[in-house]
Amino acid sequence: AFAPRIGRLATGERAVGAVTEPQGPALRPVGVADVAPGIEHLAHRPAGVHRDQRVGGRLGLPKVESARQMLHALNPECVVETIPVRLSGGELNDAVAQFDVVVDASDNFATRFAVNRACVAARKPLVSGAAIRFEGQLTVFDARRDDSPCYRCLYPELDDEAETCTGNGVVAPLPGVIGSLQALEAIKLITGAGEPMIGKLLALDTLTMVFIGLICILCI
């Protein structure tokens, strides 16, 4: 049976989103990397993979281990490989090269730029999602295609990381919405179904419930 490898990678200490959104159960096997602090509370993200932490007694566990246990409980046949260290440079490139698709659910620009560079170097498709306050974004980059943009085409690489969901907050249901859409794009990439959002940006304003589709006219 065909078993694609799905990577969900983070390199920053605050990359909580890399293991708290519901992309995980969609496909197998899954790799989870994150070095954020252990589980204390995630009440603002009830849809995440840590949602039954109090029942399961996972308080204090590293988030990658908490995610692994939750995903295993949902699907015992799902193979989850955890990487409980900060990935950077060659280690990040080597990790990305192991997977067929990378899903970035991190919450800071440093992580997103690092993962983007690794995906471009390894020519791996990257499903990028972001959520902050009441706004969300979704897009797909595929370095295997000459006509695909990358994350730096969307955002310049800056040192300023003031805009993070940790510092600015995010409404509770939104990460689950964006995460589910990321899972759908990952499925499309692996199965060849439909048309992935390569060169397109989906922007969601939950205050008006308006989805806006944008097309990159520079790269496509």
Image (tube, helix red, strand yellow):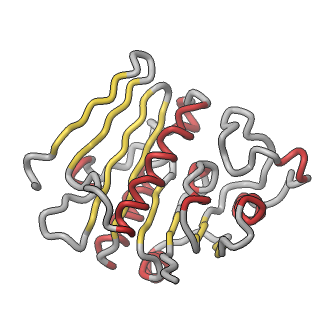
Residue lying at 46% horizontally and 77% vertically, measured from the top left: 99
Please give the name of the residue rendered at 44% of the width and 17% of the height, measured from the top-left corner. 207
Residue, x 66% and y 75% (percent of image)? Answer: 79
How far across and how far down the image is residue 166, in percent?
A: 58, 38
Q: Above or below — where is 33 with respect to 196?
A: below
Task: Estimate the x, y position of residue 28 in percent, counting from the top left.
Answer: 57, 71
The quarter holding residue 170 reads: top right
Which quadrant of the structure image shows residue 205? Answer: top left
Q: Residue at x 11, y 55 (%)?
A: 219
Residue 188: x, y in percent?
36, 60
**Percent position of residue 206, x then y:** 44, 23
Q: Is residue 55 left or right of residue 171?
A: right
Left/right of residue 205 with respect to residue 167 in the rendered view: left
User: How many numbered circles are shown?
Assistant: 0
Q: Which residue extends farthest top?
A: 208
Q: Quadrant of the C terminus?
A: bottom left
Q: Is residue 175 above or below residue 1?
A: above
In front: 129, or 161? 129
In front of the other: 31 or 5: 5
